[in-house]
Amino acid sequence: MKQNERVFSGVQPTGNLHLGNYLGAIKRFVALQEEHECLYCVVDLHAITVWQDPESLAHNIREVAAAFIASGIDPAKQIIFNQSQVSGHAELAWIFNCVARMGWLNRMTQFKEKAGKHKENASVGLFSYPNLMAADILLYRATHVPVGADQKQHLELARDIAQKFNNDFASSIEKCGHEEGFFPLPKPLIAGPATRVMSLRNGAEKMSKSAPSDMTRINLTDDRDLIAKKIKKAKTDPEPLPSEEAGLADRPEAANLVGIYAALAEMPVSDVLAQHGGAGFGAFKPELIELAVQKLSPISEEMQKLMGEAGEIDAILIDGANRAREIADPVMARVKEIVGFIGK
């Protein structure tokens, strides 16, 4: 089985996709498709590690797919699908449950953060989430994964699982004609400094879809007027913008708005400050609003159009799942052979 360079990434359908999701992930997905074979997955199996309202989940699955397409991912050239339509994700995750060690999962910081003091009440799925993530990647024998800081530990675990599988079944793998191991060790794709988008009301907190106030974030579904309103009301400080990056130290709200401008304009923060240093926020915010509306409102408008055509989105997801299975099914069949299962 020839190994091709392949990118896999996924986004959870948990509602309220926002500017942080766009700049930190989806915008990068659009760029990656120019030079890579990509699979972009709506990871709905991951979403149900915490309870989801069924109607809302169905809506959110379509909304993530709409965001992919509206942002510029071409579903005819790349594969867009939702995870639950490809049974290999769950099948391989179970095998990896039997390969991964409890000690590895106990070290996962994200589970500790999400479960908090009530980990006994957390779902088993939330605990074994990293094994499913490893299955997502390795089911397609993906070689590269775009990751943010909060996912690096999970990718390291995926590499550990791949290596242990290769070691545990080395003789069987060799009989199947894979001298260097069956699963590749996926590598992180890091494209320069990540854009860390913070709350519009508190520069010390990440922009979050779960924050109670909608004014803390710019949603990808916000229209022009709402984008403008949220930026106008974004928290700032009374000082003018500095001319150099060092001047943003201890000014989290200023740093956040400048960082958003830089990311949307695709220019270094230093260049933004060279242009706007000395200006107050009364002058800078209108410039940021104009840029944000220019970049984001076409996405919002296209998403709303697509969401009005649910059948079209469903057809794209079904087609993507069929194409994903063409890659996944032979991999899963070979995994079963390697492990020792019999039957078709």
Image: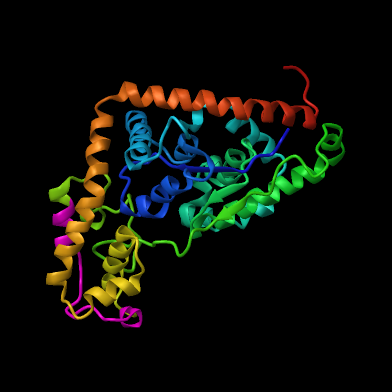
Q: Is residue 36 visible?
A: yes
**Residue 47: percent from left, percent from top:** 44, 39
**Residue 233: percent from left, percent from top:** 15, 62
Q: Residue at x 27, y 43 (%)?
A: 299
Q: How many marks?
A: 0
User: From which residue to which does the magenta span run?
Assistant: 227-248
Does the magenta-highlighted stretch encompass residue 241?
yes
**Residue 123: percent from left, percent from top:** 51, 42
- Residue 246 sits above or below residue 172 on the image: below
Q: Say whether residue 320 is left or right of residue 96.
A: left
Q: Say whether residue 143 is left or right of residue 63.
A: right
Does the magenta-highlighted stretch encompass residue 214?
no
- Residue 5 sits above or below residue 304 on the image: below
Q: Residue at x 78, y 27 (%)?
A: 337
The part of the image, by quadrant, that contains residue 14 is top left
- Residue 242 sits above or below residue 55 on the image: below
Task: Name the one closer to the observer, 251 or 320.
Answer: 320
Task: Name the one closer to the observer, 54 or 73.
Answer: 73
Q: Residue at x 58, y 57 (%)?
A: 153
Q: Residue at x 77, y 25 (%)?
A: 341
**Residue 129: percent from left, percent from top:** 55, 44
The quadrant of the picture occupied by the N terminus is top right
The quadrant of the picture occupied by the C terminus is top right
